[in-house]
Amino acid sequence: MGNGCRYSFFVCRGFRTQHQAHPSGGSTCSGISFEIIMLERLFIALTLPEDTIQSLESLQTGLPDIRWTPGEQMHITLKFLGDMDEPTFEEIADAMPDLEPELPPLRIRGVGQFSHKKWAPVLWAGLEPDEPLIELNRNVESLTNLRGIAREKRAYLPHITLGRLKKAHPRRLQEYLEMHHEFQSGDFHCPELVLFSSRLSPGGAIHRPLARVDVRGSDRHA
């Protein structure tokens, strides 16, 4: 640096960065210490077993102009938290074991799409039974709401995102939806409930697990 200052950076859990300047000779700068709070975009989701991911990947074909979700990023979102600072993140991470998540065997059933005039259409795979996932979503909403996170106003629809269309092809999309309407996977168990961070990069979103809770299996059905 031209003024003779030396800068050091310290990152704590990827959230807090401390920026400190020290005089390194001469009086061109005085000691300055300040802190920049970095925000992470977070969400809570269930992870999937590898054979289920492979089953979903078999659906990722037959459509042009679509960005398919990489297998390693497939999950069942329960709650999008948005941008969050470290203290709030730590509160939620510490409270996650209180959820004591328990789910029966699930299966993939059919495909569908979300469309919005401001967003690119999203292609998704459905899940059944859905009531245990809706119940877990309610528990996650309650846990995060107690820590200042607003409840989602839209009704929760359990799903797994297959891809995002970059350009609309109505006829091709309708053919795809009809072809896979009755698609069904074998039963599977979600191994973990995870608090993820999500960062955008030139190659797409990067998801990083920050806290994990094991999901117990159950024989109950909705």
Image: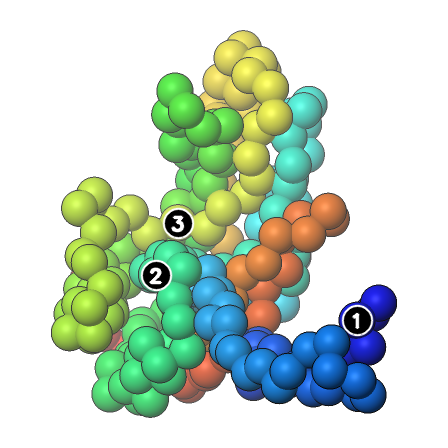
Instruction: Tell me where residue 111 appears, x and y as whole percent.
Output: 45, 37
Given the image, on which type of amino acid does mark 3 rest?
His
- Residue sitting farthest toward the top: 171
Mark 1: which secondary structure? loop
Check the image and tell me how it is coloured.
Answer: rainbow
Spatial separation of the CA atoms under disc 1 and disc 2 = 42 Å
**Left or right for 55, reference 154:** right
What is the C-alpha distance between the residues marked 1 and 3?
A: 55 Å
Give the CA separation, mark 3 to mark 2. Answer: 17 Å
Quarter residue 92 falls in: bottom left
- The residue tagged 1 is 3
Q: In the rendered structure, which amino acid carries the disc numbered 2?
A: Leu
Q: Is residue 168 above or below residue 50?
A: above
Q: Amino acid at mark 1?
A: Asn
Instruction: Assign a secondary structure to mark 2.
Output: strand
What residue occupies the far front of the structure in this picture? 27
Report the front residue among 73 and 18.
18
Left-right relation of 151 to 64: left
Q: Judge whether residue 196 can be spotted in this image.
A: no
The residue under the point 61% across, 47% down is: 69
Whole-percent x, y for residue 72 in the image: 65, 62
Q: Mark 2 and mark 1 in contact (Cβ < 8 Å)? A: no
Residue for point 40% across, 71% down = 85
- Earlier in the chain: of badge 1 and badge 2, it is 1
Q: Which residue is label 3 attached to?
A: 159
Number of numbered callouts drawn = 3
